[in-house]
Image (cartoon, rainbow, N blue to C red):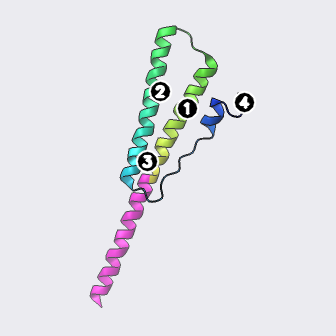
Amino acid sequence: MDIFGEAWITRHVDYFSDPEAGPDALLNDATEWLHYAHNAIRLLAELGDGHGSMNTPRLRVMLESIAAFIEMGTRCATQAHLRMQLFQVRSEECSITDDERDAS
């Protein structure tokens, strides 16, 4: 396909989250991306049952798109996990600082 075709799009997707987004928002995004993948797989299953044969180039693009959806969902979940850990470390640092102030 040409540079602006579907295959190019599925190979050049990236997920950029809001730096201020909390873990809940990121997990919501992950759920949404994985829901897209689920629906795309269900659509493929229905098309396979109905026609008996599929357009191979379109099938390849659809499978690449599903992989991109899953990758985006995984990135969101990973970022949510990292931000939860960051928030935990920050809260522990604050409590240690508060304990040191109380001791002095």
User: Residue tagged by mark 4?
Assistant: 2
**First in sequence: mark 2 or mark 4?**
4
User: Residue tagged by mark 3?
Assistant: 77
Quadrant holding the C terminus: bottom left
**Front tag of 4 and 3:** 4
CB under 8 Å between discs 3 and 2: no
Instruction: Identify which amino acid the numbered label 4 is placed on.
Output: Asp
Instruction: Identify which amino acid the numbered label 1 is placed on.
Output: Ser
Alpha carbon separation for disc pair 2 and 4: 23 Å
Element on which disc 2 rests = helix
Alpha carbon separation for disc pair 4 and 3: 32 Å
Q: Residue at coordinates 50% horizontally, 14% vertically from top-left?
A: 48
Query: Could you say which disc has been placed on residue 33 in the image?
Result: none
Q: How many residues crowd around disc 1 within 10 Å: few (fewer than 14), some, or many (20 or more)?
A: many
Task: Using the image as rendered, state which of residue 15 and residue 91 is in the foreground.
Answer: 15
Q: Residue at coordinates 31% horizontally, 75% vertically from top-left?
A: 95
Query: Could you say which disc has been placed on residue 40 in the image?
Result: 2
Instruction: Identify which amino acid the numbered label 2 is placed on.
Output: Ala
Whole-percent x, y for residue 59 in the image: 58, 21
Whole-percent x, y for residue 90 in the image: 39, 69
**First in sequence: mark 1 or mark 2?**
2
User: Residue tagged by mark 1?
Assistant: 65
Whole-percent x, y for residue 92 in the image: 35, 71
